[in-house]
Image (cartoon, grey):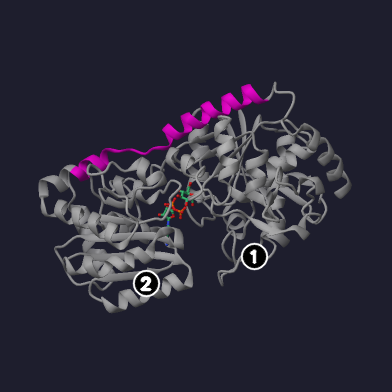
Amino acid sequence: MKVLFATSEFTDFAKAGGLGDVSAGLPRALRYRDIDVRVLLPAYPEVIAKASDITIVAHLPGRAGIEPCCIGQTFTHDGLPLFLVLEPSLYQRIGSPYAAPDGHDWPDNDVRFARLSLAAAEIAAGTAGMNWAPDLLHVNDWPGGMAPAYLRWQGARIPTLLTIHNIAYQGLYHRDRMQTLAIPESAFDVNGVEFHDRISFLKAGLFYADHVCTVSPTYAHEITTEALGGGLHGLTSGIAAEGRLSGIVNGIDETWDPSRDPHLPHHFEADDLSGKQSNADLVRTGLCLRHSDGPLFGVVSRLVHQKGLDIVAETARDIVYEGGQIAILGLGDPDTEHMLSRLARSHRDDIGLLIGFNESMARRIVAASDFCLMPSRFEPCGLTQMQAQRYGTLPIAHRTGGLADTIQDGETGFLFSELSGEGLLAACRRAFDAYDDPEVLSEMRQAAMARSFLWSGAAEEYARLYANLIGQCLPQAVPVTRRRTRRATDELATAA
Ligand code: ADP
Ligand code: GLC
């Protein structure tokens, strides 16, 4: 089975959040199952700097306002094949995959990710002039959303899978970009890419992909509801009703192992947690917190509304009052950063804050903490709570999405349903009680550390899904939107 996995993040080189980890972890696990997965990603500066021996394997022409590009092939240190979309005018910039260092999105993100999507579609359709073409195209989130659409407009019938990691990010653009993005006029329709009079890359993916997957079963249900469907619940409910929506929980990679994580000053195992205590001492010293025998609550997060940092702030005073301390590492919205800075300043001895994106610090804080706070408003999967459990750190989390699916309430962590300061505080009080009872604490830590969360489980489910899609889709002669597709194909040719 040959699969092209298109993504905008890949942790070995460029990561903004969990998508980078998934893109690095899942394809590797799939290769263990003998699936020939190749990852397609933009050649950001970090990729060019770290990748070795890039060989040009294709030259793709431009289309409408989408620049031509080259496809370079390289391999990760452990042999995973990567295809890089090389176009310096689009990707050679200092910043995150999506934004400039000042936090503003790159103004041409529509063309940048249309280029990624179009490259994916051309390789998948076998029109890129390469000596490899996949049996299935797997795209991720809005940056890959246009790929199934370009394929459909080209009349290609290779099966496509869209994984939604977060339906709140949709890639919305003004309708006057239609021609630039080589979108046929007829596709600007409720049955197409249109969403409230704008072009939606994610909607395109949802509408044109053969199958849609999210990163946990609970989130797969939640995106069909008005509350969490991001305005797309009508479409997602229809897809679910047709049996084309599934949820597969992510894994975490094997380096999240407290007995050998090179980022940790002190290693530890389930039956000897003294190293965990030493890490906590170091984190306290590093953040200038006073020595304490009370519990340490960790937060490692993107600082965005989704993650409920305002709820952490609301509860922080009570946590400190009851003898806890809080270590926070995050990067994101300036307003949230300021709010947390004020909080840390008003509790200098007990609340430590680091603003930044730092893998080592993230791992140290997760390893050092007794509990980790995740009052996310929604959480498609969440990796931090799984990483925390592996390190004997009990998550305290809102009962939503992947948090509900990966934390066993009262056994490996604490879940709360009422999303408010009181809801979080009540769960923290349960955590304080557990902390005060060494037997309960030890039992819960052991149970949490015994969970593996390895990628192999998810890889098996994806492999089964791929096989079904390849088996089901190829013989299918008539796509639901056949007439529109014909017309769209003609118009695409005109636009080009
Ligand atoms: P999301 O993708 O929504 O940000 P996840 O929990 O799925 O949330 O994944 C977040 C990933 O990013 C985890 O691997 C976490 O350790 C990492 N991470 C988040 N914030 C930081 C940070 N400030 N520094 C380093 N790593 C971070
Ligand atoms: C998104 C989600 C997060 C998920 C990650 C990887 O960023 O917010 O919950 O774990 O993608 O799938």
Question: Badge 1 local density, few (<14 within 10 Å), some, or many (20+)?
Answer: some
Residue pointed to by mark 2: 340
Q: Residue at x 21, y 45 (%)?
A: 445
Q: Give x and y (percent) for residue 48.
A: 62, 56
Q: Is residue 258 above or below residue 331?
A: above
Name of the residue lying farthest toward the right:
494
Q: Is residue 260 above or below residue 301?
A: above
Would residue 79 be counted in the magenta stretch?
Answer: no
Q: Which residues are magenta?
A: 444-473
Depth order, front residue of 11/470: 470
**Three-letter code for the amino acid on which mark 2 is drawn:** Leu
Residue 291 as seen in the image, left or right of residue 26: left
Residue 461 as seen in the image, left or right of residue 51: left
Q: Kindly report the secondary structure that dominates the magenta region of the rendered protein.
A: helix
Q: Residue at x 70, y 62 (%)?
A: 108
Query: Which quarter of the rendered picture does the N terminus lie within?
Result: top right
**Three-letter code for the amino acid on which mark 1 is drawn:** Trp
Callout in the foreground (2, 1): 2
Whether residue 166 is visible here, answered yes or no, is yes
Would residue 455 be counted in the magenta stretch?
Answer: yes
